[in-house]
Image (tube, grey):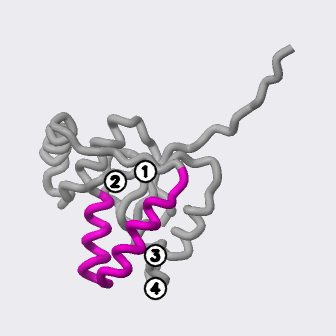
Amino acid sequence: MKSCTVKALSERIFIDSGIFIAYLNKRDRWHQQALYLFQEKNIQPYTSELVISETYSWFLHQAGEEIARQFRLFVQAIPKLKILFSNTELHAATATILDKQRGSKLTYVDAASLAHLDAQKLATVWSTDYHLSLTGRAIKPVK
């Protein structure tokens, strides 16, 4: 008789720049919530190269090279993190989203994130702003 093991289902989540910033910045108003989110078990985290680039640049210009380096090392240490990369198809999907969301002041990075969310069928986003909920995604932490 074969033994059957039940594997806990992982929630697939997308991490946006605001949560990375809140996690590493103790003075950020979302810091405690970010700490809590990163303690969640049974998650499959995703982010994108564009989010990493945006966040690294934010730390570099707002807090200096050392904190930017700490961010880079933190990203490398996140268990099971899947980094999504851009390509021609993603660029086209991003342009479509930017056209559909005119007037919402959606950044290119956020529009690309929405395109990744569609492509990967991700329903939950860890974010500190509302832009990634424009297409009905669940946002954590709940504001």
Compute the Cα span from label 2 to label 4.
23 Å
SS for callout 1: strand
- Depth order, front residue of 21/121: 21
- Between disc 3 and disc 4, the foreground one is 3
Compute the Cα span from label 1 to label 2.
10 Å
- Between disc 3 and disc 1, the foreground one is 3
- Between disc 2 and disc 3, the foreground one is 3
Compute the Cα span from label 2 to label 3.
21 Å
Q: How far across and down, in percent of the image, does residue 19 sit?
A: 43, 66
Compute the Cα span from label 4 to label 1.
23 Å
Per the rendered image, the range of residues in magenta is 51-79
Graded by Cα atoms within 10 Å as few (under 14), some (14 to 19) or many (20 or more), the crowding at tag 3 reads some
Compute the Cα span from label 3 to label 1.
17 Å
Q: Earlier in the sequence, mark 2 or mark 3?
A: 3
- Between disc 1 and disc 2, the foreground one is 1
Determine contact: label 4, label 1, CB under 8 Å. no
- Return the residue at label 2: 132
| Quadrant hosting residue 89 | top left
Q: Amino acid at mark 1?
A: Phe
Q: Amino acid at mark 2?
A: Leu
Main secondary structure found in the magenta portion: helix
Q: Amino acid at mark 3?
A: Leu
SS for callout 2: helix
Q: Earlier in the sequence, mark 2 or mark 4?
A: 4
- Return the residue at label 1: 14
> Position of 24 compared to 129: left or right?
right
- Return the residue at label 4: 27
- Return the residue at label 3: 24
- Looking at the image, residue 125 lies above or below residue 96: below
